[in-house]
Image (tube, rainbow, N blue to C red):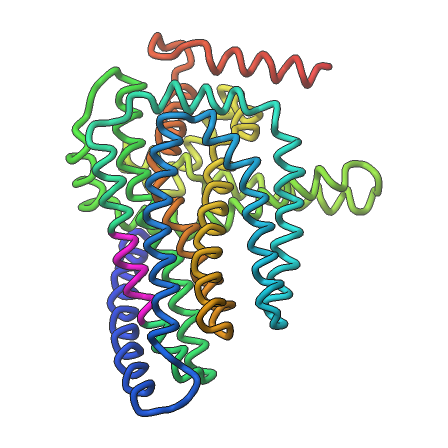
Amino acid sequence: MRKLFQIIFYIQLILISILVIVLTIRGFVYAARSTNHFRPEKWYPPLLGSVASAGIVSYLWEWISFHDPSKAIKTAFWVGPFLTCAVGILHILIGCPISLAISTIAIISSVIQSLYTCWVNPRFDYATKILTVYTSFPPDKTATFVILSIITCLVYSSFLVTGIGGATATGTGLDILFIIVILLTYTWTMQVIKNMLYVTISRVRYMNFACGADMNTWIAFRDTVQHLVGRVCIGSAVVPVIGTIRGSARVMKSVVGGTDEFLFSCADCYSRVASTLITYGNRWGLVHVGVYNKGFIQASADTWGAFKTAELIPLIDSDLTGAFCFFSGVAVGSICTLVGGTWALAIHKSYATEVSIYAFFIGYFICRVALASQQACVSAYYVAYAENPQSLQFDATIPVRIQELLQRYNV
């Protein structure tokens, strides 16, 4: 499976590169010969400007979250919903039917984000503490890897934007299919870049947490590139899907509660399926992929089994690191949408909707890549602790938190 996924990943990179080059050339030739609606000088600058904004804001956000986790967490959870709402208002101003639908989704999402923020507000102190304690001494050259990852994402995103513009120039039904394919492969590729960084940093931090050993980050990255690309590709395809299923199952079970027996039965069944899937595909398994060179499914099962043995599942479920990264991605994506969408609205209104959509995707994924190292540090700590809770390498942060959760559940 790892060889198959590795081959598929490299083949799709080659094929997408060829497709983008062909679409770009065809788009410019068509725009030069035709007096039709597509104007490259007004389509590309807003979107490329939003790509640049994504890189700058993502790096600044990573720097802030590293130096002041408390401020970063509060900003992501409290300011993020307002940025999402601002995106909704922007699409109302654009005014076309698709934009109005997007504005409805954005405004509803901002309300949901606000309600979730109010619900998890008591967990902010623990989230701040765990980010502060366990990312305060990052692996050597972490900043270099983050910057290189962001630059890679910027170059790749800009390259794909040229192809999307070429497909937009002609705008046939086949071109729409090409754009969808480009966005799907972009999603997978960005997940792979993020998880390559995640596996590298988590391996170095795991060795430090578990053994007190310092490992060279460049060596860890070299091993990841040479031996683990296939496993990372599998995890990058599986983890987002299973994570979405489990998240929706938890939400469904919380909303349904015990008010209706039939709905409760359906929610419980869905929750059981999600709990089974998460055992064989979770992001914590990527830590074992890097440390022990395991297959992704086996690594996921082993780490989840260690969490169950150490009785860490409630703590893992209540941890806000993943939610913080998601909210940060949405916030940066919203900023890029406002940059690109407002620019396009000012110079060519008909381009504003599609430019804002692409800008959001790019901003979201680049921010997730930028924050991968911090999420990797926290994940490595949880996995190392689950395997040996009595080790002297660990302080009382997790045991104290577990006692707080037990007292809350008992009450």
**Number of disc labels:** 0
Quarter where residue 251 is shown: top right
Taking the spot 61% from the left edge, 54% from the top edge, the residue there is: 106
Taking the spot 49% from the left edge, 42% from the top edge, the residue there is: 326
Left or right: 410 in relation to 368: right
Nearer to me, 191 or 302: 191
Residue 329: image location, x then y, percent: 45, 45
Taking the spot 44% from the left edge, 36% from the top edge, the residue there is: 301
Taking the spot 42% from the left edge, 63% from the top edge, the residue there is: 184
Q: For the view shown, which residue lies furthest in the front direction? A: 346
Chief secondary structure of the magenta portion: helix
Residue 64 versus residue 6 in the image, above or below: above
Residue 145 is inside the magenta segment: no
Residue 399: image location, x then y, percent: 50, 12
Residue 307 versus residue 271 in the image, above or below: above
The residue stretch that appears in magenta: 152-162
Residue 307: image location, x then y, percent: 48, 25
Nearer to me, 310 or 353: 353
Left or right: 376 in relation to 203: right
Residue 236: image location, x then y, percent: 38, 49
Quarter where residue 63 is shown: top left
